[in-house]
Image (spheres, grey):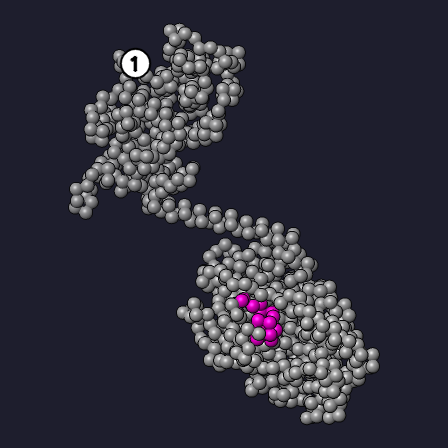
Amino acid sequence: MTTHAHVISIILDVMDPEQTEEEDFLIQIEKDAAQEDFLQGRMSGNPYKSTDAGMGPLMRDVKNRICRDTEMIALLEDDNGMELLVNNYIISLSLPIRQVYEKMWKKQHPGQAMVIVYRMRGLLGDAQETFISSFGETTEEEQMEDEKLNEALSCLVECGGLDVALQLLVKADRSTWGRQLLSQLRKLMDKCAKTRFGRTQLIERDGLSHFLKIFRLCIEPDPTDEHCVQLAKSYMELCNVIVKDEQVHKLLKGITKSEAEWLIKLVLSKELTEKAWTQQFSRGATELVELCLATLGSLILGNDEAEAALCSHCKLYADKLAEVDNDYNPQKEALQTELDRLATVAQAIPRSPAGCRLKDQILATGIVAKACKQIVDSHPPLYSATESPEWKAFVAKPSISLILKILHGLTKGHEPTQKAMADKNTLAILHRLEQVASENSIGTLAENVVEALKENEEVAAQIEKVREETKKKRKEMAMAMRMKQLSKLGMQVGKQGEVKVTSRKVVSEPLVDDVSDPLAVCCICRENLFTGKKAAAVYAFCSLTESRIHYSVSQMVMVHIDCHANAIKRGVGGRSVDEWIKAALHNAGVRCNMLTPLAIGNAPNAEWLTAVEKMRKNIEDALQTPSHFNRQFFYNDMCQIVDRFVFRRSFSEQAQGGGRESNVQYLAVLHLLCISFPPDDTSLTSNEPRHRLVSFLLTEQSLKSWEEQSQDILNASLRDGEDPAHPRSFADLRPLCLTWAFVDTYFKTVIPIPEDVERDEWLKARLLETLHKTAEFVKTFDEMILPIETWGEFIDYFNLPSDEFGDYFDQAPPPADDAQQI
């Protein structure tokens, strides 16, 4: 064997006369100075040798060594959490560390230790450095070297030298001379594996099986021999280099069934690997197992029996997914390790057609279906808080992280698995898991699965749909929670999204059982306002316009006047407090300075007169001006409400609450109050033509009476509102038209008074019904009438005769002295 080893060394000299041993180099690992306060631990072994355990062959191995030595174990399985920088460039974790040294450090810093800086990704914002994912095409010098190597390999193949070298592998043993021969043969095979031609020749000559036999030879008899373990590792690395080239996958024949079963049991079984390597070489054993796991999925490609051996293990583990969560299972820890290793195998299966065929067989074992079913069947309520005990217990289950790792590996680049997982429930729980922050990186693992699923356009569309549904559901839940909190504070959200004090209930005051209508109850005693003999009123707020015209608004919080009087008698901490500040304590915080009585006729006359007098005094105190109560006074107030409604002005500027619906309800209260006053000698007067339209609410006795003259009233109002000095324009008269529309619609939908009844009694008996009708009235007016912008739309909506109104704005205005007046 010594002679054989010497001959191999001569062949190596002939193939590459200038060959030199790969030089060792030093590595200095430092944490980012800007993240000094955030990263625990320190790499105490600086500088490291490139041959030290965990210092290669890939940058990922360096990252994992950092995670282990600094106890950042959560990042071991996460390739997205940590960044490694060399020479102020972010380096891909899949690049070989020796290649990084040769390309990015050696020439600029000869003889110096290569400095690798590690940091957490995104901790202090987005990275500004350039990311190096590969070193691009080979240089001209490297191409020339490959050509020379291919020529030498061609000569070696033609003379039968490669066949003889592979036969020597079969004859080698673990003796001292045998190890020397294996070392020389490994160098020769490394030369072959550097080019695609060499890799092809090795595959055609069943080189992978030969390498696996050497691997088995080195570790089986005495796994404590460190030199043999390193030799075994070098041959497994050789296998890994060959099978990672997807261009040669179509040539793969796969290792035999017996070899596959031995290797699968060796690396998947925790018990066997613990027997194979002692604690003394635990780190080297771990690295060797990881290398085997990364290579296993490719080694079996091309051999149906070997692939079936792996699939049988997948089927076996599919039935054990739930057992790993059983704390009383004595095999729990071993099973957890085995499933974790199976996930590593799945993630290393290549995306080539051969790899997809293997994934087809694994999919048929049912492991994907059972994994998805376990997640879907055991998850907590989907939209409950992820900080809840149920969610914390769920994501802490060992099976969840293991299932996500397995699914990620099987889903990558495999359309059938992606479609098999495209179930709405599965996608929903995966999307929910993306948002989970936990110590075992569940969120990152779920995100990896989702990103793999999005490779399929159809599944990606379903994922986006699930995400939109989640956003919608969370928005609804947030709104419901907001409404709940506002309700506790005695507030609500209006139709236009504004937050206002509710007029329907008082905080912590439940409704009386026999009163189901919130509009009909006293805000203090919660009894019905429309039954019994107590005088009732509405809290309102009165003020003056800029032109010193009185007006009032309301949020329609109603109360028995006696209840209000009793409530304000109570002191507030022994202090003297204004009546209306006290009132705000029991009327849900409604700002008010007057009580407008309900003229429903159920209270004794003395109480009614007292209520009216109190209202008059309230207004005088608030406005600091004397008030003469008659129909004209309330008519003016009604005109102001209609104006604000038609012009869409705010009702809450002064009162800090109250909207369109509540103030149209308040209009009904004022309307009934106004007609309850006896007519006096003065007529209802106004300088505004549109205000004169409002007076018909007080003068007309029935709906029929209004309908008989409504068109004549509109015609007269239009002529009354014209300006003789300007041509007719619908835009100028639109407010007048909308006011007529308000009165017409109010008569027809809110107070359709029959012809053969007493108007006042009919309105009193139906005040509560009138209040309820205002919601539909406001909706109709806002959605159907306010958007009208042209005269044609107006006459079409109200079905006005076209022969009389169709060309109204095309006619010349009549002389000013002929204008009709209402």
Report x, y in % for residue 424: 60, 53
The reply, left or right, for residue 544 in relation to residue 731 is left
Residue 802 on image: x %, y %: 53, 14
x%, y% of residue 483?
Answer: 41, 45
Does the rendering let one see residue 103? Answer: yes
Residue at x 39% of width, y 36% of height: 517
The amino acid at mark 1 is Ser
**Looking at this view, is 359 or 394 the one in front?**
359
Along the line of sight, which residue is nearer the eye, 119 or 596?
Answer: 119
Kindly identify which residue carries mark 1: 683
Magenta range: 89-106
Task: Quadrant for residue 37, please give it.
Answer: bottom left
Residue at the far right: name it: 159
Given residues 247 and 738, the one toward you in this image is 247
Q: Residue at x 39, y 40 (%)?
A: 498
Q: In this picture, is 406 found above or below 624?
A: below
Q: Is residue 55 above or below residue 764?
A: below
Q: Residue at x 26, y 12 (%)?
A: 681
Horizontally, residue 160 falls left or right of residue 57, namely right
